[in-house]
Image (cartoon, grey):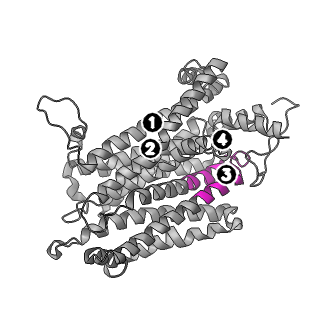
Amino acid sequence: MKPEDPPIATLDPGPDKVLGPGHDYASVTGKISGVVYRPFLKTPWQLFVGFGIAFLLVNLLLVAVTWLFFRGVGIWGIMIPVAWGFAIVNFVWWIGIGHAGTFISAILLLLKQDWRTSINRFSESMTLFAVACAGMFPILHLGRPWLAYWLIPYPNTMWLWPQPRSPLIWDVFAVSTYGTVSVLFWFTGLIPDFATMRDKAPNTWAQKIFGTLAMGWRGSAKHWARYQKAYLLLAGLSTPLVVSVHSVVSFDFSVSIVPGWHTTIFPPYFVAGAIYSGFAMVLTLAIPVRRWYHLEDLITMRHIECMAKVMLGTGLIVAYGYAMEAFMAWYSGNQVERYTFINRAWVGGYWWTYWILILCNILTPQLLWSKRVRLTLPAVFVISLIINVGMWLERFVIVVTSLTRDYVPSSWGMYYPTIWDWCTYAGTLGLFVSLMFLFIRGLPAISIFEMREVVHEQKHDH
């Protein structure tokens, strides 16, 4: 840094600022690229500990999946009538986790919300890794995962095609489209930063790697014009995917005639819940990383507060969905629907999970109405963790309690997850965290060029 450059701010600038004071282009570039180019031994020890735990969980996932291939899905707790268990619960939960990234990057970009700039790259990466974790479960749940390609309408000599009326086939197209567009959106946004990392590379290998990824970017006016068009187009493509992909996932349930599933409120209810849990996961990861790498002047309290407000708003939509479920069970006059809700909340074997999710998803987030709570990092972190637990329990309640009590009492049965269910789930958590830590260490986790634009705007405002 040149002597005349203003010093980098070390204190949090408060909730009113997008970026801390005292920044110029060089300081922003150095701060963000310094996370990647920091010497290995100077990496925060918390990252080593977290990555070590996550890597152990990845190995646990490999053991669980290997045993699954040897023994089949019978090692899980699924049986008739509960043929869907943890695999589908975790699939829906992980897809929901991935929604915040697309919401922050695409919808908030189109709405011109400047507070998205410090967290969009982070959340986009979270989307990719969450979708990767989600995509495992339907394949593992098939029983013959090596035949997963049968779900895709590929040309074959026997003229065997997937059933287009099956919502499971809809999932294949929705999730694969969502993942593809998310990868394109993420990579396109990284191209200008790859060029910056190439120019600041401390060694030849880093220069070659980032130079290849930059695809010949030189920052010319023609490059920027084409980039802006492509980025805006991908944002426009991503926006309907936020609504469509989890709506399609909800069709897995709502198009059936199973009591508790056959309802039209599921698509908007699932979408709101997905954004809700996604923002909770962004906060769960961003708050520790912000502290470990001293990024308080880039991810300011304004970002934390805005995310807490979005989380509060989507939480109220989810609460409305819970209320409508209870109301329609009573108002419909359908005895089966009434019994399903009573079984879910009062007399069934899983009644306690319902009230824990009410505590986690409705009651606890009401603390975010207080500005003091929204600006208290430990409180926001704990609330986001509680919401993640509550949203997982919501998917468990929806999937399992509806299947344990069908129309015919002779087919009733309870579901108890086995150790292999828990190992597979914990393993995907480890895979997700491992990929996030590798991303933070290897690529710019905050958009350099967008933060420079913020610096430019703030200078002109003054």
Q: Secondary structure at mark 4?
A: helix
Q: Are marks 3 and 2 in contact (CB under 8 Å)?
A: no
Residue at 62%, 54% (x, y): give it. 287
Name the magenta segment's main secondary structure. Answer: helix
* Mark pair 4, 2: CA separation: 40 Å
Amino acid at the residue labelled 1: Val
How far apart in space, not on screen, are marks 3 and 4 (Cα)? 27 Å
Q: Secondary structure at mark 2?
A: helix
Q: Is residue 226 visible?
A: yes
Q: Residues within 10 Å of mark 3 (few under 14, many from 20)?
A: many
Q: Residues within 10 Å of mark 2 (few under 14, many from 20)?
A: many
Marks 1 and 2: which is nearer the front?
Answer: 2
Between the C-alphas of marks 1 and 3, the distance is 25 Å
Q: Earlier in the sequence, mark 1 or mark 4?
A: 4
- Please say if 418 is above or below 152: below
Q: Which residue is mark 1?
A: 181
- Marks 1, 4: nearer the viewer: 1
- Residue in the foreground of this view, choosing between 82 and 439: 82
Element type at mark 3: helix
Point out residue 22 in the picture as x, y percentages from the top left corner: 82, 41
Q: Nearer the viewer, residue 73 or 123?
A: 123
Badge nearest the viewer, 3 or 4: 3
- Could you give the CA–CA distance between mark 1 and mark 2, rounded to whole angstroms? 9 Å
- Contact, CB < 8 Å: mark 1 with mark 4? no
Q: Foreground residue, 259 or 347?
A: 259
Nearer the N terminus, badge 1 or badge 2?
Answer: 1
Q: Which residues are magenta?
A: 282-310
Mark 1 or mark 3: name the one nearer the start of the chain.
1
Q: Amino acid at mark 2?
A: Leu
Question: Farthest residue in the left direction?
Answer: 158
User: Of marks 3 and 4, which one's residue comes earlier in the chain?
Assistant: 4
Instruction: Give the residue at mark 4.
Output: 42
